[in-house]
Image (tube, grey):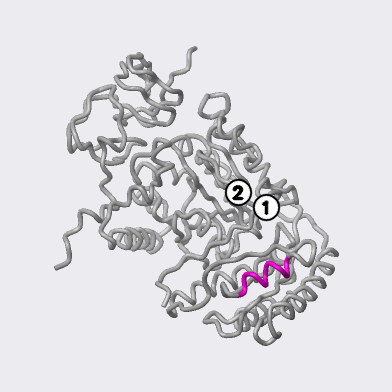
Amino acid sequence: MIRSKALVIKDTDNVATAIQAIRAGEAVSLGIGEHVLAIKVLDDIAFGHKFALVDIAAGAPVVKYGEPIGAAIKDIKTGQYVHVHNVESIRGRGDKQQPKG
Amino acid sequence: MEFMGYRRADGTAGTRNHVLILPTVACANHVSRAIARQVEGPVWVEHQHGCSQLAPDAAQTARVFVGHGIHPNVFGIVVVGLGCEGVRAQDVAAEIKRLCPYKPVHCVIIQDAGGSFSAIAEGARAANQMVKDASLCVRQPISIAELVLGTACGGSDASSGLSANPALGEASDMLVDAGGTAVLSETPELIGAEHLVAARAVNKEVAKRCYDMVRRCEESANALGVDMRGSNPSPGNIEGGLTTIEEKSLGCIYKGGTRPLVGVFEYAEKINAKGLVYMDTPGNDVEQLTGMAAGGCNIIVFTTGRGTPTGSPIVPTIKVAANSELFHKMAENMDLNAGAIVTGEETVKQVGQRILAEMIEVASGRLTKAEILGQNDFGINRIGPSM
């Protein structure tokens, strides 16, 4: 059995994590629960980095480990690279506090 | 299951038998190092604190010093002060002696001794006698229920949460089931995952303390008006694939396994519970190790995805690489490899068992890579500014 190049941790995740470097254009097969999903990866993904399993709308949660890990800053397409350029954290956002008058 | 350890007169169990040279103020660093170099065997630390600190901050610093002095891994201690510092060496030494009357404790005050050379001579004579006496101690079989495991992750990347942290969680569960204590810490790395840990609290009070601790941490981060990203997660974490603190936290909490959370402790507070507990520490690697050591952890397992040499001067720190590339690249710093979990060649349970076996060997005397390199990393978490 050929091992997948990416891992999906929980069935409800909308991103996968590369456990081998993936080149843009590669088709990756992923086991998610009982199902096998085939995704065409649109960008180069380094070891440990993520790509989208489904389209994620701007403002929608990015889900890994079955939990929200942040929100999309812009629309993300299936297979696109997901990282700091298109995801923001919800927590620890001192920059979003109201300035104290 | 047993390890070969040192039984102290107060019943506590140590995995090492160190003589420690400890400055209580930065001004005594240089003399402390010189004392340690005069005698073969002591460990020493240096730091930037011990004076000009507001009372609650100074109290926390003192707690770190006393915690290291009373630690069962420390046979004897030479406490070095300047003579005018806020965290007085005499007070720290007296408190160590009060709590551990059986332990050799000597206090050197540079101003009283008459300068550097006299202080070095006095401290070296005391250390010399302690090393001699320590050499007579013999290890004996002790139940692993007396291990207090500090769990740490540092230099994390995305593989940390996939391999090494879950494997450490397995080992943590096995130790807790055997009657031991495991400590989870690094409060910024609970942000986004705190509900999962609080859900395992044995009662509402422990759960509330968990949430309060995380809120306090997040508020202090937000107080400076910036996005935490870049400080935690660090640039290295981000390069390694971790996008947000939430993602990092969800991978980090695996270190704590699955057993119920029985208590929450402040930074460097003495841990007096069996089972899984939480200690409020920053994510900063060195400050975290120092807090857990001061609280009484007698073995530490430290996972890393990017690689780091850090190790406590008094508590053996076992390094677990989260990916095989790191394990081979930084071989002189890594003790175990969890990378085979990523490739599917080993299961989390198998690596967890290997971690537990290594913990027992190291507790019984096998040196870690960090000890062989002489790592004596010591960093005190400050809760106030210097005045």
Please tell me which residue lies in front, B88 or B98. B88
Are the two marked residues, 1 and 2, in contact with CB atoms closer than 8 angstroms?
yes
Residue assigned mark 2: B175
Of the 4 image quadrants, the one containing the C terminus of chain B is: bottom left
Q: Return the residue found at the far bottom.
A: B112
Q: Is residue B266 above or below residue A31?
A: below
Residue assigned mark 1: B144
Residue shown at 65% from the left, 76% from the top:
B80
Q: Earlier in the sequence, mark 1 or mark 2?
A: 1
Residue shown at 58% from the left, 43% from the top:
B171
Judge left or right: residue B75 versus residue B148.
right
Chain of the residue under label 2: B
Q: Is residue A61 visible?
A: yes
Question: Which amino acid lies under the numbered mark 2 shown in the image of this protein?
Answer: Leu
Any magenta on residue B360?
no
Chain of the residue under label 1: B
- Dominant SS type (magenta): helix
- What secondary structure is marked by label 1? helix
Q: Position of residue B272 (x, y in %)?
A: 56, 66
Residue shown at 50% from the left, 47% from the top:
B154
Q: Position of residue B150 (x, y in %)?
A: 56, 54
- What secondary structure is marked by label 2? helix
Mark 1 and mark 2: span between their CA atoms? 7 Å
Q: Which residues are magenta?
A: B28-36
Q: Position of residue B135 (x, y in %)?
A: 84, 63
Task: State which quadrant residue A7 falls in.
Answer: top left
Judge left or right: residue B229 versus residue B376.
left
